[in-house]
Amino acid sequence: MLSGNLRDLPFPSLLRALVGKTGVLELWSLENGARYTLYLKRGEIRCLEGEQGFLDQDQAKRVLKALFTAQTGAFEFVAKEDFPTPCRPAFRWPVERVVRSLNLRLTREKLRETLESLF
């Protein structure tokens, strides 16, 4: 089990620590008061569940982007050897690729904001 706060272990670092893992990551007490559960299987994000149920791909991408910059929130990852993926269809997003993609997207957005403020 791995638990803590995003203040001490930011979400990008937390995801990197879970590359190749299988289990359930719960996040709560986030800045917006939301609670999310990520289901990981063999290093892939299979599902993302919010308080209202499983998110579709577009909703999940928005939530992951918000989590990537979250400053506060508690988390707990519980490793599980094998479990049935609770949603259909599963995303099957490699954690490593998600981290790289979000890093690149946020870097581009920050660069764009900086350039726009200069002109």
Image: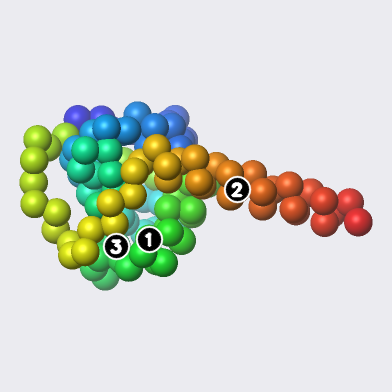
Q: Secondary structure at mark 3?
A: strand
Q: Is disc 3 surrounded by few (<14), some (14 to 19) or many (20+) residues within 10 Å? A: some
Left or right of 32 on screen, residue 27: left
Instruction: Give whichever of discs 1 and 3 has the lower sequence position.
Output: 3
- From this view, report whether residue 97 is shown above or below residue 48: above
Q: CA distance from mark 1 to mark 3?
A: 9 Å
- Tag count in the figure? 3
Left or right position of 40 against 62: left
Report x, y in % for residue 42: 21, 38
Q: Are marks 3 and 2 in contact (CB under 8 Å)?
A: no
Pointer 1 with pointer 2, Cβ within 8 A: no
Residue neighbourhood size for the residue with mark 2, other residues' Cα within 10 Å, grouped as few (<14), some (14–19), many (≥20): some
Residue appearing at x 20%, y 43% in the figure: 41
Q: Which mark is residue 106?
A: 2
Which residue is under mark 3? Answer: 50
Coordinates of residue 17 in the picture (x, y in percent): 35, 29
